[in-house]
Image (cartoon, rainbow, N blue to C red):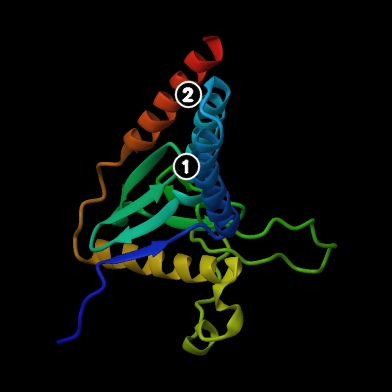
Amino acid sequence: MASTVLEQEYGPTSGVVTGWIGMVLCAVLIVAVPVANQDLGSARIAVGVGVAAALIWMTMLRPRIIVRLPDILLLRNPLSTWEVPLAAVESVSVRAITRVGVGERTYDGVAVGRPVRPPRPAGAGLPGFGGRRGVVRSEPPTGKARLRPNASTPNAIADLMTEQLLAAADRARAAGQSDTGIDRVWAVPELAVLGALTVALVILLLV
């Protein structure tokens, strides 16, 4: 029996390698500095590096766009997550970030974006981006296109995410899923860790 994919997840299209390198370096410093010199200065450095690691995680590695079938879209950002009913999604555009249109409002997801380029000369055409209702929509990637070496580029990921998200929204509406109840859920664990480390750093600096 064929398995059904219940979740489609799209991670950050930029900064992932840099983020993980930063996390590894922070982990090494947090362990090495107190071992090398067990004094107040080392404790300050270790906690300060912990604050940097929390910020790297939240800004570069935490963001995700998750299509959770059959009815929910999650736009996970550094500080919070938008929970949007798929049936309410009317448009999707991807430039530096992803913007989802619901009625007269838009909700942003910073995970998936296209490279920012200088404006093209007049007549050169504009790079396509996904969308509906007056927003230029990318051509759906073909099966062959997804197998090409450049299929993991930010533009290709943005095209694929756009098509799959809009298709999931169409299916949710066709199935009669609810289109109400947009929630914002704060990143409580990350904010708690960042807050605790920040308070600890301030205390150590004042000692």
Q: Secondary structure at mark 1?
A: helix
* Mark positioned earlier in the residue sequence (1 or 2): 1
Residue at (45% x, 56% y) in the render:
91
Number of on-image labels: 2
Residue at (38% x, 63% y) in the render:
9
Residue at (82% x, 67% y) in the render:
123
Q: Which mark is residue 170?
A: none
Query: Is the residue under label 2 in contact with that under label 1 (CB below 8 Å)?
Result: no
Tell me if 8 is positioned left or right of 110 in this view: left
Residue to which mark 2 is pinned: 198
User: Furthest residue to the top?
Assistant: 207
What is the three-letter code of the residue carrying label 2?
A: Thr
Residue at (20% x, 57% y) in the render:
177
Name the quadrant containing residue 15. bottom right
Residue to which mark 1 is pinned: 58
Within-10-Å neighbours for mark 1: few <14, some 14–19, many 20+ = many
What is the three-letter code of the residue carrying label 1?
A: Met
Give the quarter of the figure containing the N terminus.
Answer: bottom left
Q: Is residue 168 above or below residue 182?
A: below
Residue 178: x and y in percent read 21, 52
Q: Is residue 86 above or below residue 80?
A: below
Q: Is residue 29 above or below residue 171?
A: above
Residue 29: x and y in percent read 55, 41
Q: Is residue 185 above or below residue 173?
A: above
Nearest the eye: 100 or 12: 12
Residue 89: x and y in percent read 37, 54
Q: Secondary structure at mark 2?
A: helix
